[in-house]
Amino acid sequence: MLNPGNSYQTMGGNPYQKTQVTSSNPEKILIMLYDGAINFTKIALDKMNKGDRAGKGKFIGNAQAIIAELMNTLNHDAAPVIAKDLERLYIYLIDEYIAANISNAPKHLDNIIRILTIMRDTWSEAVEVAKKERISGVFR
């Protein structure tokens, strides 16, 4: 469904993060991307609450770049229905970022954080289940 293998550029220029991403499996990279989007959104919310419009815009832009990267890595051939549903959700999140930036209303960023956290936790659980299935399959 997703192929986040070349996504380190959305994480910024941090060499530690680059090493972490280039040496991680795709599942770990996916979780890191969600973590990055959540973190940038929380920072944007903090900047919004402090009246820092430029800072808010910068971090909304960073988070949007990660969502765009997640959308670009969708594999519509492997799982067309799931990929289409995720694409719609990512478009909705981008629309929420735009609304937050224009209206300066925290409710949009709160909603994004809630959705991204649920998605991140769901993917994390799925990765753990898959890992356990792989391990149990090896020992059968």
Image (cartoon, rainbow, N blue to C red):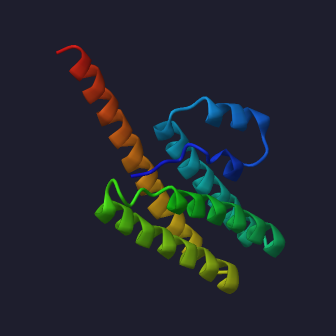
Q: Residue furthest front?
A: 77
Q: Residue furthest left?
A: 140
Question: Considering only vertical position in the picture, is 82 above or below 22?
Answer: below
Residue name at image x 72 percent, y 63 percent: 59
Q: Position of residue 17 (x, y in %)?
A: 70, 37
Q: Residue furthest bottom?
A: 103
Q: Position of residue 41 (x, y in %)?
A: 63, 61
Horizontal side of 9 relative to 76 (left or right) equals right
Horizontal side of 57 relative to 125 (left or right) equals right
Q: Position of residue 2 (x, y in %)?
A: 44, 51
The quadrant holding residue 138 is: top left
Q: Nearer the viewer, residue 24 or 106?
A: 24
Residue name at image x 68 percent, y 85 percent: 102
Quadrant in the picture for the C terminus: top left
Q: Nearer the viewer, residue 43 or 91?
A: 91
Say how many tags the image has.
0
Horizontal side of 30 relative to 85 (left or right) equals right
Residue name at image x 74 percent, y 33 percent: 16
Horizontal side of 129 relative to 25 (left or right) equals left
Question: Considering only vertical position in the picture, is 122 above or below 76?
Answer: above
Residue name at image x 57 percent, y 49 percent: 33
